[in-house]
Amino acid sequence: MNEIDEVVGEFLVESYENLDLLDRDLLLLEGDPRSATTLASVFRTIHTIKGTCGFLGFAKLESVTHVGENLLSKLRDGVFVLDATITNELLAMVDVVRGILGQIETTGEEGDGDYSALVGRLAALAEGQPLAALDEGQPLAGPAEDQPVAAPAEDQPVAPAEDQPPAAPARGQRRGGATKGRARTPAGAVPAGAGAGPTPVPDTVTPADDDGEPAAAALPRLGELLVSVGAVSPDDIRTVLTAQAEGDPRRVGELLVDRGAATQAEVGLALRAQLAEAATVPDSRSNRPDSTIRVDVGLLDRLMTLVGELVLARNQVLAHSSTASDRALVAASQRLNQITTELQEGVMKTRMQPIGTIWGKFPRVVRDLSVTCGKQVRIEMQGADTELDKTIIEAIKDPMTHLVRNSVDHGIESPEARTAAGKPAEGRLLLRSFHEGGQVIIEITDDGGGIDGGRVRAKAVERGLLTPEQAERMSDREALNLIFLPGFSTATAVTNVSGRGVGMDVVKTNIERIGGSIDLQSWPGEGTTLRVKIPLTLAIIPALIVRCGGSRYAIPQVNLLELVGLDGDQVATAIESLHGAAVYRLRGQLLPLVYLRSHFGLEPAPEGDGLNIVVLAADGRRFGLVVDGVHDTEEIVVKPLGVHLKGISAFAGATIMGDGRVALILDTLGLAQRAGIVGETRDRALDHATTETTVSAAHDGQVVLLAEAGGSRIAIPLAKVDRLEEFPASAVERAGHREVVQYRGQILPLVRVGPLLSLFGGEPVEPETISVIVYREANRAIGLVVDRIVDIIEQSLTVDALTRAPGMDGSIVVGERVTDLLDVRHVVEAAALDIYDPAEAAP
Amino acid sequence: MKANEQYCTFSLAGLHFGIPVEQVQEVIRPQDMTPVPLAPSVISGLINLRGQIVTAMDLRRRLGLPARPADKPPMNIVVRNDDSALSFLVDAIGDVIEVTAETFEEPPDTLTGEARELILGAHKLDGRLLLVLDTARTMALQPA
């Protein structure tokens, strides 16, 4: 690979930017073909590229941009109005230019691609069709080239002079490109009369007539200048312009001189005046480069580090000055404090980029895609100036593009379908971005057909991702989020755009990787909204500081769900063991616990202390991290770990605390994976979406609570188990013939399972406390008194129906022990309880 | 080996070591250390070097020497390799000395184990040996 020297490098960077601008401008222009400012901007961009590549000796690039420039000059002069054909060709030119630039970037050479077809088409378009009738051999542009007065306009990059030499297309044509091109793509070169080609505009007289475009926005035209100095009459100009519109290839100045309406000197003066004007015409876009400079991101990172350092120094100074009696020192340190804060904000801002930098290419993406799909889509953007850290911008670029493509491909229907549904044929895609609660929200809304929950379910079943029963029990909202599962796509047809079932899960993973989240809402027939939430920056994040084994650790706030604090005496009962794995019941759901101490190979915390559970979310699953203590939330600066520690997945990086010490940042996902909460593969991803289904399907044998009653083991489907409680025996009261306890402000009837099952005769020994399984059905709870709670297990159970007996649904084998599956309904009925009777149920 | 070389010297469990001065970024006093659970045992923790977080490696452990007494806080020699910085934890810092190639000798075959890989050889100085450490190899650690 050749080394690219600096000049070429600069040229590439600048040209890429220019091309992006060109994409946008061309599409703008398609919507408003006569916008003089946009046309001028497009022209200028191409001209700049052409000029530079000529200077650098990239001949191919120059030839392509040259014909493009000529075509554009015609458009700008109002000879044609931009239409779809021209736009297509110009966009094709942009792509070719981009391709050549890519070649130059990698090889330093232009490559040996053949672009004569495109050059030919562009030249043919630029020709202006009535002109095509003229003999090709006629030296059309001769006079213009020979005329010294016209020369300045030709080489001036920023001067959209009213007339540009038609010499170039003619030249290109003489090379034979045009004829070849025309033969290959007849559609692109159909004469104007056929309707598909460029349309002549006979009524363009002065810019003031162009859609009321303010004259100040555009450059004064040559004709106007001549009229204003009194050299020619408006009628002369009109005649000349009409002649041009009818196909006379010569320029306004030329024609005027030929007609004797003006002298060469007068035209020359006017052209110079036009150039002078061009230099002073205010243009918002051309001013922008002056107010910005390119800065190496590495330098910004270094500044960021230094500012972090300064913040620490500031903190130390503040700590000292708070005890100092020197008022001057206190005042100075206060100022230092303020300035440091502002500096920190300022430096952070340097790394921010508007989200518009990635949205900028979407109009083109949407346009190309809608053409491919045969759809009509209008893209709208709100909040393109919302700023995000550069690293985040990079990270969401691909996911965003994917989502936009998806919306066009799957979301918005074909024009026919839309019309049939009573919607406008043109679909609308709205991108919105705004700040909300320290995060950035990006919404992608389409007014398409929406996603049908039923179809998603059916697809999930078809793909084997769900059983039909699971699918049935799933709410629509849950069903919609199935599309984020790997291997899922509802597209009926696999297009080359999307629909291969890879994508949404990758999008979700990528967004979650940067601490974001994605949510989908859909209204059948009305459209779909994808809502992406992402943090403002990865460099500085809010984090919860926790303590464990004498060290502090930072947990990114985005992963944090809630904090649970347990008193010393609560710990023994609140933490249960599920086959050796510690779990805590958080509002009725089992929360697996990860002890940070034991995970880090530290001694367990002393018994009797309280327990701090930090409830975290990782890859859609919750787990509780048990730490020694919980401190405040702080804004931390994320710093990478050295190469020796990169491999430890439990850490996401490190940060420097206010006292100058280093604290490690915990990687929630990494921790969860290490602890086995989340599988390396996402194969268990469904479990989350279907937690309820799984549990309620437990009767078929999945999650059961094991207990001992009357000396025998019994199993109860966990789904119906509300809580496990212990009551002192003295708390048991009698209400009529029933035993009850007061429980959460209500009366809980008790059923003693052991005697009921008559497994053992005789009175059981009355313990000091009784273990109660609070069982819930139809909003009424009863307490099943058992001798002991054994475990909660999750495994496939095979019910042996032969062992079915009163009170038993059958026997199962759990851990090599025969266990009776309790028929709770029977037990309750046998106890003559009436919880199944709603009439009596009301307390 | 160049004719004359300058070494930054330090001691470890009674032995004298040296690394070329140009590889040393700076020498700093004992620092607050944040231990890293799950890290390889030779990694003592992280230190804050003016806002940059630097991994500290215990050279005694790296070279298979007996552990440092708890009451002797280690000095830091910050070495730089390409883009990454690493701090070597040593017992004490010695002078910078200049040696000539004549005094250098390869390690004897009786030197075995981990240290064999990391010690390039020794300069025979008056009354003592200066062991030359292979900085790059010492810094590079196979992922645990």
Image: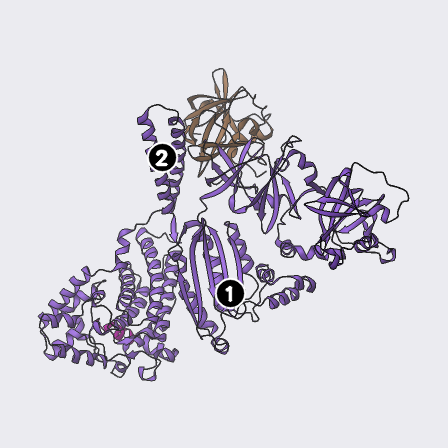
**Residue shown at 36%/73% (left/top)?**
A117
Picture coordinates of residue A826, whole percent (x, y): 82, 55
- First of labels 2, 1 by sequence position: 2
Measure the C-alpha gap from mark 2 to mark 1. Answer: 47 Å
B83 on left or right of A613: left
Mark carried by residue A337: 2
Residue type, label 2: Asn
Picture coordinates of residue A302, whole percent (x, y): 38, 40
| In the image, farthest residue toward the right | A761
Dot 2: chain letter: A
Mark carried by residue A528: 1
Along the line of sight, the residue nearer the viewer: A29 or A478: A478
Is any atom of residue A146 visible in this view? no
Task: Indicate whether B5 appears above or below A176.
Answer: above
Residue A45 placement: quadrant: bottom left
Task: Indicate whether A764 appears above or below A842.
Answer: above
Mark 2 Cα-neighbour bin, 10 Å: few <14, some 14–19, many ≥20: some
Is any atom of residue A568 visible in this view? yes
Q: For the residue labelled by badge 1, is the local secondary structure a helix, a strand or a loop?
A: strand
Whether marks 2 and 1 lie on the same chain = yes
Q: For the residue labelled by badge 2, is the local secondary structure a helix, a strand or a loop?
A: helix
Magenta-span inclusion, residue A364: no
Residue type, label 1: Thr
Residue range in magenta is A158-175
Dot 1: chain letter: A
Give the chain ID for the purple colour: A
